[in-house]
Amino acid sequence: MPATRNAFTPPRLAALRWLTDPGRHVPAEIRTRLLGEIFGSPKAIIVGVINGLLFNVLALAMLGGSVFTAFIVFDLALSVLRIVVVQHAVGRARAGATTPTDLYLVTAICWCALQGAIAFEAVRGGNPTLSLLAATSTMALVGPISARNFGAPRYAMLLVCLCELPFLSAAMLWGDRWMLVLLAQIPLFLYGVNAVVARIQVMAMANIQAEHDSSRHARHDALTGLLNRFGLMKRLDAEYAGGREDFIMFYLDLDGFKPINDSFGHPVGDLILSAVADRLRGATRPTDLVCRLGGDEFVVIARRLSPAEGGKLADTLIRAVADGPFLLPGLPPMRVGISVGFACSPEDGSDCADLQRKADMALYEAKRAGRGIHRRFSLHPSPIGTPEPRFARAG
């Protein structure tokens, strides 16, 4: 269902937040998906609307009276409102805007309460055929409600009770003492529905978690946990393409790493790379992106910095990596340095691919000038030629 892929705004009313809370054991990243599942597909709403209206028309034909005429009018108006609200909500979720979640939840609650009231009046009329149809009509709602609202068990159970309990109450008031058996069946029925909803939620959470883990593995470096090349490209496309925000792109390459890797082996080299990643995280802000392209090459994206501030951050990154030795158990202290090249948006351009190329060129100039330093992209080409960008070559 497309709606489940989008971010819907949590309810504002405290009562609705409580109703739609999936439980304390649910991680934050899954909560958003579960809230989206409540919106489900507009087609399911339409099917429920048709079912309710057909029963309403039959009740009017069999019992007559102004009550069922009013029910039909209310049902039509509420159904149209629900369809409009859910379509509007899905559209705003796709656009990344706030969604009318409270209104959607309230209209669904009102619609289920209306279906319960219709069933109550139908059974109270004393027509056995219509009573059987009322039982069938209300029970037909339990499955879709459970399937659509498993992300919020409390909310699902409220909707089921609003649909079913009025019908069951009318059945017990019918005058047949055997109907009182329903008093014992109602708790069993509600327990069964709750168990079904809980089971669907568990299975859905497992699928969502597996999808989330797969996506994370595809976008993050397995060694350091940083964004990898693919993850960086996705973030650049989503957040920085088209010059939507000013940022600085830093390309970083370790100095003196190859001798350590060659002398002590790749396991030790991996430990150094992980430690470097930790130092880069510690030297940047929470809003900055730190990525590992592969090997000993890293990228940092820092937003809302001036070029002068970019130079200061480059110095900070160099000191963070080079100022202290790396202490590994059973090995002598090891030191590596880092060279940094950077390009600024919008001063050096706004196209991400162009900035990648320019930051890589600046890194080459830093390496050529002595290593352990930083260089900003310069419009003046290197006298010994322009290098092929490593970012483009590795892709």
Image (cartoon, grey):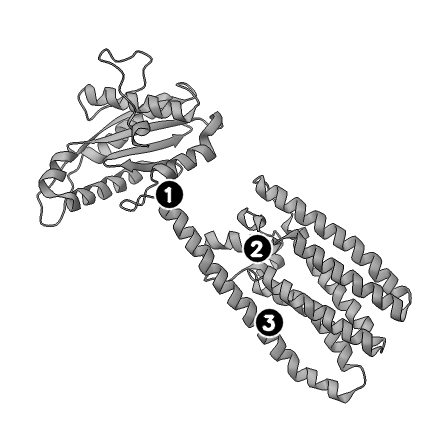
Residue at left offset 52%, top offset 52%: 33
How far, Cα to Cα, is label 3 from label 1?
39 Å
Residue 63 higher or lower than 348, as above or below: below
What element does badge 1 sit on? helix
Going from N to C along the chain, the mark reached first, 3 or 1, is 3
How far, Cα to Cα, is label 3 from label 2?
18 Å
What element does badge 2 sit on? helix
Q: Residues within 10 Å of mark 3 (few under 14, many from 20)?
A: some
Q: Position of residue 139 (x, y in %)?
A: 69, 70
What element does badge 3 sit on? helix
- Mark 2 belongs to which amino acid? Glu
Outermost residue, bottom side? 177
Q: Position of residue 131 (x, y in %)?
A: 79, 75
How far, Cα to Cα, is label 2 from label 1?
25 Å
Residue 219, numbered circle:
1
Going from N to C along the chain, the mark reached first, 3 or 2, is 2
Q: Is residue 346 left or right of residue 388?
A: right
- Mark 3 belongs to which amino acid? Val
Q: Nearer the viewer, residue 92 or 276?
A: 92
Q: Position of residue 366 (x, y in %)?
A: 23, 22
Residue at left offset 61%, top offset 53%: 39
**Do the numbered discs 3 and 1 sit on residues whose CB atoms are within 8 Å?**
no
- Mark 1 belongs to which amino acid? Arg
Q: Residues within 10 Å of mark 1 (few under 14, many from 20)?
A: many
